[in-house]
Image: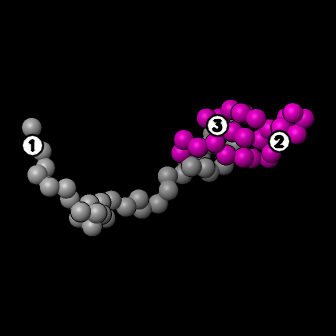
Amino acid sequence: MAHPKRRQSKSRRNKRRSHFKIKEPLLVKCAFTKQKHLYHHAYWHENKLYYRGKIVCSKNEKESL
């Protein structure tokens, strides 16, 4: 296996990684609420937290705890 003889500098590493850019965030429309949200992220809609089309928790439950 090849091993580097010397450590690469931070600037060389950053130059190599500079071409990887995310063009825009990946938004998905929920089939349940028809709201756009970030993929693989939970989101709030009408005081309820949704994830994968299911209610995870609601603000009313949080206040009672």
The residue under label 3 is 51
- Placement of 54 over or under 36, stated as above or below: above
Sequence order check, earlier mark of 2 and 3: 3
Of the two numbered discs 1 and 2 in the rendering, the one whose residue sits closer to the viewer? 1
SS for dot 2 = helix
Image x and y of residue 34, in percent: 66, 46
Mark 3 or 1: the one toward you: 1
Q: Quadrant of the N terminus?
A: top left
Q: Position of residue 23 (x, y in %)?
A: 42, 62
In this view of the protein, can residue 1 be seen by the observer?
yes
Establish if 15 lies above or below 32: below
Residue drawn at (19%, 56%) of the image: 7
Q: Amino acid at mark 2?
A: Lys
Given residues 19 and 8, the one toward you in this image is 8
Q: CA distance from mark 1 to mark 2?
A: 55 Å
Quadrant of the image occupied by residue 57: top right
Q: Earlier in the sequence, mark 1 or mark 2?
A: 1
Q: Is residue 51 above or below residue 44?
A: above
Q: Are marks 2 and 3 in contact (CB under 8 Å)?
A: no
The stretch of residues the image draws in magenta is 39-65
Amino acid type, label 1 = Ala
CA separation in Å, label 2 and label 3: 15 Å
Circle 2 residue: 59
Judge the density around disc 1: few (<14), some (14-19), many (≥20) Cα neighbours within 10 Å.
few
**Total labels drawn:** 3
Question: Which of the two residues, 9 or 22, is positioned nearer the viewer here?
Answer: 9
> Is residue 60 in sight in this rendering?
no
Say what secondary structure mark 3 lies in.
strand
Residue that carries the numbered disc 1 in the rendered image: 2
